[in-house]
Image (spheres, rainbow, N blue to C red):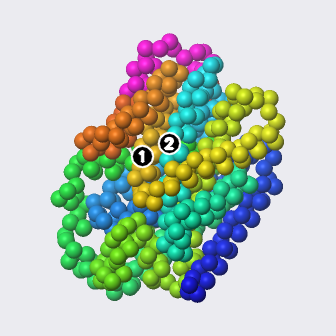
Amino acid sequence: MIIYIPTYVAFTCYLLAMLSLGWLGYLATKNLSDYILGGRSLNSFVTALAAGASDMSGWLMMGLPGSLFTKGLSEVWIAIGLAMGAWTNWRFIAARLRLYTEKYGNALTLPEYFSNRFEDKNNVLRVITALTVLIFFSVYCASGIVASARLFEHLLGMQYATALWVGAVATICYVFIGGFLAVSWTDTVQASLMFTALVITPLMVIHSNGGIIPSFDAIKILGIDHFNMVGNNTSWIAIVSLLAWGLGYFGQPHILARFMAAKSVQAIPAARRISITWMVLCLFGAMSIGFFGRAYFSIHPHFAATVQANPETIFIELTKLLFNPWITGVILAGILSAVMSTLSAQLLVCSSALTEDFYKMLLRKDASQRELVWVGRSMVLAVSAFAIWLASNPNSLVLNMVSYAWAGFGAAFGPVVILSLLWPRMTRSGALAGILVGAIVVIVWKQYEWLSLYEIVPGFILAMASIFIVSLLSPTPSASMRKTFEAVSREINRLQVARQ
C-alpha cells in the first residue's frame, strides 16, 4: 500500500483545506440567514461556481461517464437537455427568484417563498413543500454518500460500509460547522478542482490510446452503434426522456438557493455566463472520459474487470492507471469535490426546511438566532444519519438515485416556481395542486415505468396543467398579491432595459 501514501497525503490536505474554510464560515455566521443563505452576499463568480458545483454531483464524475461507456453517444442527449435547461433557468428564473424572495418577506427557503408568495395563512402549502423537500432530498443525499463510498472503496481499498462513513463524515463536518458560507466558498474551490480533473483526464486517456484516430478505431471494433446518437435501441421516447432532464432545473431547491443568495440581481448575468461555460466544458469532459475510456479498456482488456462490473467506476480506475499517485490524489479529489459540493448543499436545504419551516414555524416562533443556527446544525446530523441508512445497500447506483430525486423536484416544484414568477393569476390552491400532482405522478410512474418514459415528463406536464386548472377555478389572488407581483415585474423590466 506504499503506492497510496501520496494519495492519502493529497486527500488529507484537501480535507483539511475544506475544514479550514468551514471554520472561517463558522466565524462569519451570526444568524440563521447567514447559515442558510450566507446573508445574500455572494458575488457573480462565487454564485456561478456554487450553483454549478452544487448541481454537478457525483453523477457527473461517475454516473455520466459510466453511461457513455456502456451505451455510447446515444447518451449525449442528457447533456444537451441539461445544458438547455440550465441556461433557461439562469436566463428566466434566477433574477426573478432573487428579487421575489427578497420582496416576499425576505424568504430564506423555497417553502417560505411559496408561503409568502401565496399568502398561505394556515401554512399548509409551506408544510407540504417542506415535506416534499425532505422526501426527495433523502434519496438525493443518499446518492452522494454512495458516490463518496465508491470513491474511497475503490481508491483506498476500504470495505463499502467503512467507506460509507468516511465519505459522509468528511462532508458533514464542514456543513455542520460553517453552513452556507462555508459550502459556497468550498464549492468555488471544488468547482475548480472538478474542472481541472475533467479537462486533464480525457486528454490523458486519448494520449494513452495513441490519439483520436486509434481511439475511434478501437471503438469501431466493438460495434458502430457506439457512435450513433440514435442507435438501434434508442427510440424517440428514450431521446425525450434524456432531454427531459433539463426540466429538472426549475425545481431543484439546492440550485435555486444559489440564485436567492446572490448579492444582487445585477450579479446574475455575469454569473450565468460563467456557470454555463463551466457546465458545458465539464459535461464534455465527463462524456469524453466515458466514450474514450471505452477505447482504452478495449485496447487494455486486462484492466477492464472492475469497470465491466460497475461502469460508474471508470473515472476512478482510469485515474489510478494513468497518473502517478500524487496526481491521482489531486484528480480524484475532484471526484470527491463533486460529491461533497452537492451533498453539502442538499444537507443544508434539508436543514433549513426542518429549522425554518418546521421548528421555528410550528414549535418555537420566538427562538433566538443562535438557537436556530444550532438547531440547523442538529438537523444536518439527523438528515445525514437517515441518508447513510438509505445508502447502506452496496448495490446502489448513483445515476438511478439521482434521476429519481431529480424528477421528483423537477415535477413537484418546477411548474410552481415558473408560474409563480411569470403568471399573476396563479393561486395558493393552484400551487398546492401542482406540488402534490407532480410529486405523486413521479412516485407512481417510477413504480410502473409506463412506456419506459422518464417520470419527470408526465409529472411536469400534469403538474403544470393542474396549476392552470385549479388556479382558474379558484378565487382571484388578493389585491396585495397582485400589487407585489406587479412591483417586482416592473423592477425586473427596468433592470432588463438598463442592461440593453
Query: How many residues crowd mark 2 within 10 Å: few (<14), some (14–19), many (20+)?
Result: many
Displayed quadrant of residue 492: top right
- Residue 284's spot in the image, x, y percent? 41, 65
Q: Earlier in the sequence, mark 1 or mark 2?
A: 2
Q: Which structural element holds mark 2?
A: helix
Query: How many residues crowd mark 1 within 10 Å: few (<14), some (14–19), many (20+)?
Result: many
Q: Which residues are magenta?
A: 464-483
Residue 301, placed above or below residue 458: below
Residue 370, placed above or below residue 204: above
Q: Would residue 173 be found to the left or right of residue 406 on screen?
A: right
Q: Quadrant of the C terminus?
A: top right
Q: Is residue 81 visible?
A: yes
210 or 394: which is nearer to us?
394
Q: How many marks?
A: 2
**Image point 76% across, 28% down: which residue?**
365
427 or 296: which is nearer to us?
296
Q: Quadrant of the N terminus?
A: bottom right
Is residue 421 shown in magenta?
A: no
Name the residue type under label 2. Answer: Phe
Residue at which label 2 appears: 136
Mark 1 touching mark 2, by CB under 8 A?
yes
Name the residue type under label 1. Answer: Tyr
- Residue 490's spot in the image, x, y percent? 59, 30
Residue at which label 1 appears: 404
Q: What secondary structure do most residues of the magenta stretch adopt?
A: helix
